[in-house]
Image (cartoon, helix red, strand yellow):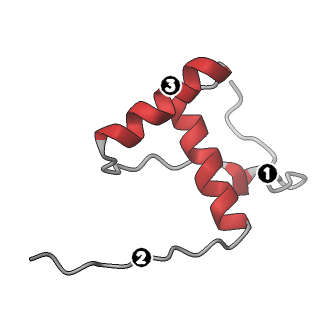
Amino acid sequence: MRKKYDFSKARKNPYAKRLKKQITIRIDEPTVTYFKKVAEESGIPYQTLINLYLRDCAESKRSLSVEWSASA
């Protein structure tokens, strides 16, 4: 290894925006089961499928509509 490296001609990573960040998220069992089933059928890992779905929601600026019903 060199003692010094010249980074004067370096450029920013063009893929830096696509880097993934590890987080902890709680997802209910039926949802995980659904994505695992789709993963088996498609051959794509279920975490990748969840990421693709969430990215699609974010890119299309899909908004969530939640209605709470009163329980007796």
* Above or below, 34 relative to 68: above
In this view, the residue in front, 44 or 42, is: 42
Q: Which numbered marker is on residue 64?
A: none
Image quarter (top left, top right, bottom left or bottom right) of the C terminus: bottom left
Residue drawn at x 64%, y 25% as measured from the top left:
44
Mark 3 lies on a secondary structure that is: helix
What element does badge 2 sit on? loop
CA gap, disc 2 and disc 3? 26 Å
**Residue at 64%, 71% in the rendered image:** 62
Residue displayed at 34% across by 47% down: 27
Dot 1: within a 10 Å radius of its alpha carbon, few (fewer than 14), some, or many (20 or more) residues?
A: few
Residue 36 percent across, percent down from the top left:
47, 27
**At which x and y percent is residue 21?**
51, 50
**Nearer-N-terminus badge (2/3):** 3
Q: Quadrant of residue 43?
A: top right
Q: Is residue 59 above or below residue 67?
A: above
Q: Residue at x 35, y 39 (%)?
A: 30
Q: Earlier in the sequence, mark 3 or mark 1?
A: 1
Outermost residue on the front side: it is 72
The reply, left or right, for residue 37 in relation to residue 55 is left
Q: Is residue 25 above or below residue 37?
A: below
Numbered mark located on residue 13 in the image: 1
Dividing the image into 4 quarters, which one contains the N terminus? top right
Q: Give the amino acid at mark 1.
A: Asn
User: Quick check: 53 above or below 29?
Assistant: below
Q: CA distance from mark 2 to mark 1?
A: 39 Å
Residue that carries the numbered disc 2 in the rendered image: 66
Q: Percent x, y for residue 63?
A: 58, 76
| Furthest residue in direction left, as rendered | 72
Q: For residue 71, what is the image quadrant?
A: bottom left
2 or 1: mark nearer the eye: 2
Q: Which residue is mark 3?
A: 37
